[in-house]
Image: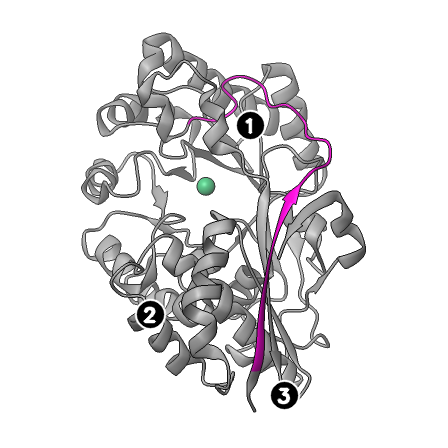
């Protein structure tokens, strides 16, 4: 079996978008006090669609969401030439080839995102060739269904925030996550506004539902240290990305305080990055995204390594490439789930690009046993709402 073609397309949303409210989510730019809208760096409206064609007619589908135009260039210029003519079932060999070929400029970030997209497509082919869903190839079901948490609750008017939280509770979710709106430059007043967000959601849903909160790297260690005691009464299941991804020791310092479990890893890469997070006791929960971390070939290894450290993996974003890992790993108790909404941030765009993503029902998603591969197809007819860059 041979790879005959690798096709990359970047699709950029051209339809309507919902304008986000000010302070809807902290992010790393906030520390700079720029005159422009700091939310700009948080929104992204592009996605990479990857297809790998084979001489047997099987087509693997992969995707990437981070910096898709440059990711496309990495695949087209550096990965495609080494893939053409190779056996797509040689997933481990091809991963090592891509990784070592791009070592000088790759390793983390865009280079690894590109490798991830290819690796996901190769696993899709592996499933299709063997007529098995990918989770079966990874070990089968470790749970009847996948518990998912509603991931939204951006900082907004408090009565609207409470209404959104109640809606998720009514829909059957047993866990949900909110976003903080304020960071260090907003001072003590911003801290109180952050606490008001958490208190509002807690009062809306009670204490029999897990609540998590995400700072999306918008805080500093000092600020997080001051926030932690204020947050403690609200029994958060975790505090997510309180500091930037490079500040591993900041994560470890917060975890050592022991007040609130610390989660992170959606901006970390490969077994080497997660070895360091685990060895430094930096996180209580690992949140890699399979389409960044190095594809399924890396995700399964990291999940196994984390199991030995008794650190659960709850991947970023949901999406099929993560759900198959969660289904087949006892060390993955839950998955993130972005509800289907009008286009706002950009992280909901996969709903508009791919068909086959499972919808949450009563707080769970399920995977089909009769769909080979990852179970996705491309909504070609709906791509007219996007600019398509071949
Ligand atoms: Mg996150």
Near mark 3 (Cα within 10 A), the count class, few <14, some 14-19 or many ≥20, is few
Work out which quarter of the rendered image holds the N terminus and state it.
Answer: bottom right
Q: Nearer the viewer, residue 237 or 374?
A: 374
What secondary structure is marked by label 2? helix
Q: Residue 53, located in which quarter of the rendered image?
A: bottom right
Q: Residue 29, located in which quarter of the rendered image?
A: top left
Q: Is residue 23 magenta?
A: yes
Q: Nearer the viewer, residue 308 or 233?
A: 308
Residue labelled with disc 2: 99
Residue 315 at x, y percent in the picture: 47, 54
Which region shows up in magenta? Answer: 4-26
Q: Nearer the viewer, mark 1 or mark 3?
A: 3
Question: Mark 3 or mark 1, which is nearer the start of the sequence?
Answer: 3
What secondary structure is marked by label 1? loop
Residue labelled with disc 1: 154
Q: Nearer the viewer, residue 97 or 197?
A: 97
Q: Any mark on residue 55, and which? A: 3
């Amino acid at each position: 079996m041979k790879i005959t073609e690798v096709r990359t397309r970047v699709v950029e949303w051209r339809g309507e978008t919902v304008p986000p409210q000010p302070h809807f989510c902290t992010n790393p730019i906030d520390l700079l006090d720029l005159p422009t809208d700091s939310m700009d760096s948080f929104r992204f409206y592009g996605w990479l669609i990857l297809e790998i064609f084979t001489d047997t007619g099987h087509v693997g589908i992969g995707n990437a969401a981070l910096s898709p135009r440059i990711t496309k260039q990495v695949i087209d210029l550096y990965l495609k030439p080494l893939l053409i003519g190779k056996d797509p079932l040689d997933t481990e060999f091809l991963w090592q080839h891509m990784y070592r070929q791009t070592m000088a400029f790759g390793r983390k970030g865009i280079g690894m995102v590109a490798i991830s997209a290819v690796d996901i497509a190769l696993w899709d082919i592996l499933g299709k060739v063997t007529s098995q869903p990918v989770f079966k190839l990874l070990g089968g079901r470790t749970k009847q269904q996948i518990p998912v948490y509603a991931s939204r609750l951006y900082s907004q008017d408090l009565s609207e925030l409470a209404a959104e939280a109640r809606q998720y509770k009514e829909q059957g979710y047993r866990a949900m996550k909110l976003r903080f709106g304020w960071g260090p430059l907003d001072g003590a007043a911003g801290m109180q506004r952050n606490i008001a967000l958490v208190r509002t959601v807690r009062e809306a849903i009670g204490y029999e539902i897990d609540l998590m909160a995400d700072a999306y790297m918008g805080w500093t260690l000092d600020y997080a240290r001051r926030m932690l005691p204020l947050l403690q009464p609200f029994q958060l299941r975790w505090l997510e990305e309180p500091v930037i991804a490079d500040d591993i020791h900041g994560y470890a310092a917060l975890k050592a305080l022991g007040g609130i479990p610390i989660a992170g890893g959606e901006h970390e890469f490969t077994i080497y990055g997660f070895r360091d997070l685990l060895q430094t006791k930096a996180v209580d929960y690992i949140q890699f995204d399979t389409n960044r971390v190095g594809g399924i070939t890396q995700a399964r290894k990291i999940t196994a390594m984390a199991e030995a450290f008794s650190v659960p993996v709850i991947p970023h974003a949901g999406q099929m490439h993560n759900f198959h890992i969660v289904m087949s790993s006892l060390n993955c108790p839950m998955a993130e789930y972005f509800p289907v909404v009008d286009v706002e941030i950009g992280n909901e765009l996969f709903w508009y690009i791919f068909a086959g993503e499972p919808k949450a029902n009563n707080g769970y998603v399920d995977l089909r046993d009769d769909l080979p591969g990852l179970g996705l197809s491309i909504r070609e007819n709906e791509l007219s709402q996007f600019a398509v860059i071949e």
